[in-house]
Protein backbone atom coordinates (compact mmCIF):
# COMPACT_ATOMS: atom_id res chain seq x y z
CA UNK A 1 0.00 0.00 0.00
CA UNK A 2 2.85 2.39 0.81
CA UNK A 3 4.33 1.71 -2.57
CA UNK A 4 1.22 3.10 -4.26
CA UNK A 5 1.18 6.11 -1.96
CA UNK A 6 4.81 6.99 -2.58
CA UNK A 7 4.52 6.59 -6.33
CA UNK A 8 1.76 9.16 -6.62
CA UNK A 9 3.37 12.60 -5.98
CA UNK A 10 0.03 14.23 -5.14
CA UNK A 11 -0.74 11.66 -2.42
CA UNK A 12 2.79 11.96 -1.04
CA UNK A 13 2.45 15.75 -0.84
CA UNK A 14 -0.94 15.45 0.87
CA UNK A 15 0.39 12.92 3.38
CA UNK A 16 3.36 15.15 4.21
CA UNK A 17 1.05 18.14 4.60
CA UNK A 18 -1.28 16.23 6.89
CA UNK A 19 1.69 15.04 8.98
CA UNK A 20 2.94 18.60 9.28
CA UNK A 21 -0.51 19.83 10.35
CA UNK A 22 -0.75 17.00 12.87
CA UNK A 23 2.61 17.95 14.42
CA UNK A 24 1.60 21.62 14.58
CA UNK A 25 -1.68 20.73 16.28
CA UNK A 26 0.15 18.56 18.80
CA UNK A 27 2.57 21.41 19.56
CA UNK A 28 -0.34 23.83 19.98
CA UNK A 29 -2.22 21.47 22.31
CA UNK A 30 0.94 20.94 24.36
CA UNK A 31 1.57 24.69 24.65
CA UNK A 32 -2.05 25.35 25.66
CA UNK A 33 -1.90 22.62 28.31
CA UNK A 34 1.43 23.99 29.63
CA UNK A 35 0.02 27.51 29.89
CA UNK A 36 -3.14 26.24 31.56
CA UNK A 37 -1.09 24.27 34.06
CA UNK A 38 1.05 27.31 34.84
CA UNK A 39 -2.02 29.54 35.24
CA UNK A 40 -3.72 27.03 37.53
CA UNK A 41 -0.56 26.69 39.61
CA UNK A 42 -0.35 30.46 40.02
CA UNK A 43 -4.04 30.67 40.87
CA UNK A 44 -3.63 27.95 43.48
CA UNK A 45 -0.64 29.73 45.00
CA UNK A 46 -2.49 33.03 45.16
CA UNK A 47 -5.69 31.47 46.46
CA UNK A 48 -3.80 29.39 49.00
CA UNK A 49 -1.88 32.37 50.28
CA UNK A 50 -5.06 34.41 50.63
CA UNK A 51 -6.86 31.53 52.35
CA UNK A 52 -3.92 30.98 54.69
CA UNK A 53 -3.79 34.67 55.51
CA UNK A 54 -7.52 34.73 56.21
CA UNK A 55 -7.26 31.64 58.40
CA UNK A 56 -4.34 33.02 60.40
CA UNK A 57 -5.96 36.40 60.87
CA UNK A 58 -9.29 34.87 61.88
CA UNK A 59 -7.64 32.47 64.33
CA UNK A 60 -5.30 34.96 65.95
CA UNK A 61 -7.71 37.83 65.64
CA UNK A 62 -10.26 35.94 67.74
CA UNK A 63 -9.32 37.97 70.81
CA UNK A 64 -11.11 40.97 69.26
CA UNK A 65 -14.47 39.22 69.50
CA UNK A 66 -13.74 38.30 73.11
CA UNK A 67 -12.98 41.94 73.74
CA UNK A 68 -16.43 42.94 72.50
CA UNK A 69 -18.07 40.27 74.63
CA UNK A 70 -16.11 41.41 77.66
CA UNK A 71 -17.25 45.01 77.10
CA UNK A 72 -20.84 43.84 76.98
CA UNK A 73 -20.37 41.95 80.24
CA UNK A 74 -18.61 44.90 81.83
CA UNK A 75 -21.66 47.09 81.47
CA UNK A 76 -23.87 44.51 83.17
CA UNK A 77 -21.54 43.69 86.07
CA UNK A 78 -20.66 45.48 89.26
CA UNK A 79 -17.87 48.07 89.11
CA UNK A 80 -15.40 45.86 91.00
CA UNK A 81 -15.84 43.05 88.50
CA UNK A 82 -15.52 45.46 85.57
CA UNK A 83 -11.96 46.26 86.60
CA UNK A 84 -11.09 42.55 86.51
CA UNK A 85 -12.57 42.22 83.00
CA UNK A 86 -10.55 45.17 81.73
CA UNK A 87 -7.37 43.42 82.84
CA UNK A 88 -8.34 40.38 80.77
CA UNK A 89 -9.34 42.44 77.74
CA UNK A 90 -6.25 44.64 77.52
CA UNK A 91 -3.95 43.40 74.74
CA UNK A 92 -0.78 41.89 76.10
CA UNK A 93 2.70 42.34 74.74
CA UNK A 94 2.64 38.85 73.23
CA UNK A 95 -0.63 39.48 71.41
CA UNK A 96 0.77 42.73 69.99
CA UNK A 97 3.84 40.85 68.71
CA UNK A 98 1.57 38.17 67.24
CA UNK A 99 -0.48 40.82 65.52
CA UNK A 100 2.64 42.39 64.01
CA UNK A 101 3.91 38.99 62.84
CA UNK A 102 0.56 38.27 61.21
CA UNK A 103 0.62 41.64 59.47
CA UNK A 104 4.14 41.01 58.15
CA UNK A 105 3.24 37.50 56.99
CA UNK A 106 0.18 38.89 55.24
CA UNK A 107 2.30 41.50 53.48
CA UNK A 108 4.82 38.88 52.38
CA UNK A 109 2.11 36.58 51.03
CA UNK A 110 0.38 39.42 49.23
CA UNK A 111 3.70 40.49 47.72
CA UNK A 112 4.28 36.95 46.43
CA UNK A 113 0.76 36.89 45.02
CA UNK A 114 1.35 40.29 43.36
CA UNK A 115 4.57 39.03 41.76
CA UNK A 116 2.87 35.91 40.42
CA UNK A 117 0.01 37.98 39.06
CA UNK A 118 2.38 40.41 37.34
CA UNK A 119 4.33 37.49 35.81
CA UNK A 120 1.08 36.06 34.49
CA UNK A 121 0.00 39.39 33.03
CA UNK A 122 3.42 39.87 31.39
CA UNK A 123 3.23 36.40 29.84
CA UNK A 124 -0.24 37.18 28.49
CA UNK A 125 0.99 40.51 27.15
CA UNK A 126 3.96 38.84 25.43
CA UNK A 127 1.72 36.14 24.02
CA UNK A 128 -0.72 38.73 22.67
CA UNK A 129 2.14 40.67 21.06
CA UNK A 130 3.44 37.48 19.42
CA UNK A 131 0.00 36.61 18.03
Image (tube, helix red, strand yellow):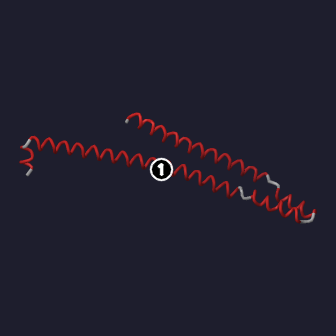
Q: Is residue 74 left or right of residue 64?
A: right
Q: Is residue 6 left or right of residue 98?
A: left
Is residue 44 placed above or below 123 in the rendered structure?
Answer: below
Q: Nearer the viewer, residue 113 or 21?
A: 21
| Location of residue 21 in the rendering, given as x and y in whole percent from the top left corner | 24, 44
| Location of residue 74 in the rendering, given as x and y in whole percent from the top left corner | 87, 62
- For label 1, the crowd category at 10 Å Cα-Cα, with few meaning under 14, some 14 to 19 and many 20 or more, is few
Task: List the single residue furthest toward the top.
Answer: 129
**Residue at position x 60%, y 45% in the image:** 110
Where the C terminus falls, by quadrant?
Answer: top left
Residue on which the image places disc 1: 41
Task: List the single residue furthest toward the bottom.
Answer: 77
**Residue at position x 82%, y 58% in the image:** 89
Q: How many marks?
A: 1
| Location of residue 76 in the rendering, given as x and y in whole percent from the top left corner | 88, 65
Q: Is residue 56 left or right of residue 91?
A: left
Snapshot quadrant of residue 65: bottom right
**Residue at position x 89%, y 65% in the image:** 77
Q: Nearer the viewer, residue 66 or 87?
A: 66
**SS state under label 1:** helix
Amino acid sequence: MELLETQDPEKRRLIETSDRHKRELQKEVKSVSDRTERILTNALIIGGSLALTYFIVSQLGGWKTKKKKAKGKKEETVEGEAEDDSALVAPSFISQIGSKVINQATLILLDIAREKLSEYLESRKNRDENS
